[in-house]
Amino acid sequence: MILSGQEIKKNLGNKIFIEPYNETQLNANSYNVKLNEKLICYKEETLDMKKKHALEEIIIPDEGFVLQPGELYLGRTEEYTKTFDYVPMIEGRSSVGRLGIFIHVTAGFGDVGFCGYWTLEIFSVKPIRIYKGVEIAQLYYHTINGEYENYQSSKYQNNNDVQPSMLYKDFLK
C-alpha cells in the first residue's frame, strides 16, 4: 500500500523525517522534493565499474543551467530524509517528465531505514534549462510486510552530498 499525503503528514517526526519540510509540497499521496544547486558529472568518456571516477562539479546559477542530451548529471534533493517502517521511493514529477527529463535512470527504489539526501540521476532528451530549488521529484512511501532489517550501507547511508557510484567498492571485497 502507498501512504496518503495525510498519512505521510501524520508520521512526520516519528517514522518519516523530511528536513526542511514545507506543507505546500505535500500532495495527495506523495511529497515534492526540490533540486539542490550542485550537480556533478563524470569526466571520463568511458566508465569502468571497478574504478573510482574523476568528477566535475557544477553549481546551478540563478539564471539556470542547460542540461545536454547524452550527459548524465548527478544531483541531490534539497531535503534530507529519514524513513523507518516504510519503504521510501522517488519518481520524477509528471510536469518535469513531460519536458523530457529523467530524474532517475534505475534507482528510484529506497530502502526502509534510509537516512540521507536522495541522489538524482538526471538525464534529458533535449537541451533544457533547469533551476535550483525547482520541485523536481516526489517521494512516496510503501508499507512493508514481514520482518526486516533497517538499511545499512557504508557507501550511501547518512550521506551529506551528491553521491557518485561507489560500485567499485564491491570489487574490493
Image (tube, grey):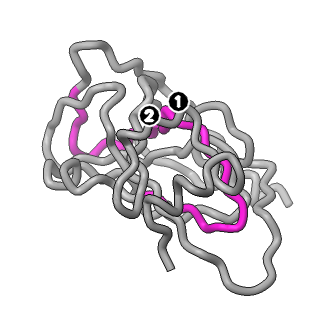
Pointer 1 and pointer 2: residues touching (CB < 8 Å)? yes
- Identify the residue at image location x=21%, y=28%: 66
Residue at 54 percent across and 45 percent down: it is 118
Query: Magenta span: helix, strand or loop, mainly?
Result: strand
Circle 1: element type: strand
Left or right: where 163 falls relative to 36: right
Provide the secondary structure element on which disc 2 rests. strand
| Percent coordinates x, y for residue 140 in the rendering | 47, 61
Front in this rendered view, residue 80 or 49: 80
Q: Which quarter of the figure has residue 53?
A: top right
Q: Amino acid at mark 1?
A: Leu
Q: Nearer the viewer, residue 130 or 69?
A: 130
Q: Earlier in the sequence, mark 1 or mark 2?
A: 2
The answer to whether any part of residue 139 appears in the image is yes
Measured Cα–Cα span from mark 1 to mark 2: 6 Å
Say which mark, if any, is on residue 41.
2
Residue 29 position within the rendered picture, expressed as x and y whole percent measured from the top left: 39, 63
